[in-house]
Image (cartoon, rainbow, N blue to C red):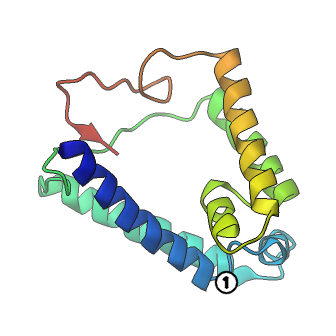
Amino acid sequence: MKARKENGVGLVFGACFGALLAAANLHEYDTIHAMLRFDELDVYGLMASAVFVAGGLLWWFERRKVGTVLNGKLYLQRSKPKRHHITGGALFGIGWAIAGTCPAPALVMISSGATFGLVALAGIFVGIYLRDRKSPQNDYGDGEHHIVPESPVSV
């Protein structure tokens, strides 16, 4: 029953996020390329406002010990930038520039009928597969933060 509730919450938030991306035309190849050419600066403003609002709210929720939607404990993980963060960010940016999309907008592309989204999604899964071949992980986490079953939920 808990998994069904988690999936339902994820579906609602994912649908809302997808609707926001579609409303802002962030699933459009031309919008992303215009942004990367610095012709569409409003996209940077949208991304920056999302980071500041989410970061501020998460910080505030953590300080006030607000629980998650699924009654878990919330705490933010902090780490210092390392070489693999820079390499991963560069590879992500190159893929984003070539494809004109990243994972969430690729799903919005597919739902809007753009078949290029399927090509982008296939590329995303190939990238995940190649990354796992290079440095396999047997547990959940990004390689620095590991969640054990008894620990609180992390963001």
Q: Position of residue 24 (x, y in %)?
A: 62, 83
Residue 137 horizontal side relative to residue 121, left or right: left
Q: Say whether residue 83 is visible.
A: no
Q: Say whether residue 31 is visible.
A: yes
Residue occupying image coordinates x 35% and y 46%: 155
Q: In which quarter of the image is residue 58?
A: bottom left
Q: In which quarter of the image is residue 129?
A: top right
> Foreground: 38 or 96?
96
> Foreground: 127 or 119?
119
- As displayed, is residue 14 above or below residue 86? below
Element at label 1? helix
Type of residue at label 1?
Asp
Q: Position of residue 94 (x, y in %)?
A: 83, 48
Q: Position of residue 5 (x, y in %)?
A: 23, 53
Quarter of the image with the N terminus is top left
Residue 2 horizontal side relative to residue 108, left or right: left
- As displayed, is residue 36 above or below residue 150? below
Residue occupying image coordinates x 70% and y 72%: 27
- As displayed, is residue 128 above or below residue 69? above
Q: Where is residue 38 in the image (x, y as percent from the top left)?
A: 82, 76
Q: Disc 1 designates what residue?
A: 42
Residue occupying image coordinates x 87% and y 72%: 37
Question: Alpha-carbon neighbours of circle 1 within 10 Å: few (<14), some, or many (≥20)?
Answer: few
Residue occupying image coordinates x 17% and y 54%: 63
